[in-house]
Image (cartoon, helix red, strand yellow):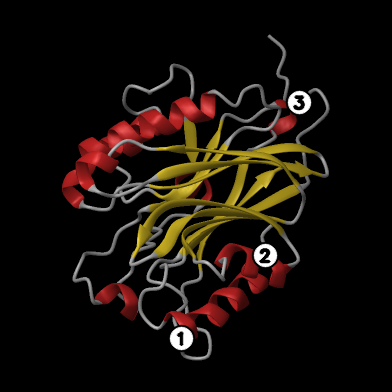
Amino acid sequence: MTDHHSESGLLETRLRILTWNIWWRFGPWRQRRPAIAATLKRLDADVIALQEVWSDETTDQAAGLAGELGYHHVYAWSMDMEGVGFGNAVLSRWPIKRHDTIPLHGGKETGEGRNALFAEIEGPRGLIPVFSTHLNWKLHHSHIRQRQVTDLALFVDGKRPWSFPPIVCGDLNADPPSEEIRMLTGLATCPVEGLVFHDAWRAAGGGGAGITWDNRNPNAATELEPDRRIDYILVGWPQARGAGHIVGCKVAGNEPVDGVWPSDHHAVLAELRY
């Protein structure tokens, strides 16, 4: 059997991808806005998946952040909150060739409008399929999230073929041992046979808990919930020459900027062979 990764050697070039729930218009949102932008500029990811992005008749937060970074973007509204849009976005250093959105299960049952956003990015070394999503938040909604990850997996599978593995980013509101995460990572029955993802933190986080809901952050501490890892970058099976192989992962956005914590979540930043 031929090892297709070793035929020409593993790729040494990298893709930096970030996921971050930026907390809609909760808390001191006007003061948080420049802290979010400053953090994104400092981290300098090539591709950024955002959740809890807001929009109204005059302002599109995703467009504003993309403009400051000089990036391309796409935004997908998922529900209204107090008359203001709430949704997911993808920002990219490179053009976005096409995009698509699907609603996820649970809207009628829970009143939470959730979706998955797909963006196919025209990177300098080939197309990159990226998905940004945000699942139901309540602890007792695991059965809803399991249906949502099934919808998500079918959506991802429908975007084949790809030469770079699909990247699923988001606030999944589920701990690593949960059934919904196990379904995506091949530790339980996969929603789509053969479609499994590597958890970037587990693969290359360097040990530790990788907490993204952290009571050191005063924006999170007010909810009186335990520390948890609920934000993920999940990457499909590596392709030729190791394309998509996860080589590094860290928690980011986990400190205040000029005294202001940017969000109630921390971000996750991963490096992949590309």
Residue of label 2: 66
In the image, what residue type sits under mark 1? Val
Q: Marks 2 and 3: which is nearer the front? A: 2
Residue under the point 59% across and 52% down? 248
* Whole-percent x, y for residue 252 in the image: 52, 67
Q: Residue furthest front?
A: 57
Q: Residue furthest bottom?
A: 258
- Label 1 element class: loop
Depth order, front residue of 268/131? 131
Depth order, front residue of 131/271? 131
Q: Report the Cα–Cα distance between label 2 and label 3.
A: 38 Å
Q: Is residue 185 visible?
A: no
Residue of label 1: 260
Depth order, front residue of 38/26? 26
Q: Marks 3 and 1: which is nearer the front? A: 1
Which quarter of the figure is the N terminus placed in? top right
Q: Report the Cα–Cα distance between label 1 and label 2.
A: 21 Å
Residue of label 3: 6
**Going by the image, does 172 lie left or right of 248?**
left
Q: Earlier in the sequence, mark 2 or mark 3?
A: 3
Residue under the point 18% across and 71% down? 224
Residue density around tag 1, few if under 14, some if 14–19, many if 20 or more, within 10 Å? some
- Label 3 element class: loop
Q: Earlier in the sequence, mark 1 or mark 2?
A: 2
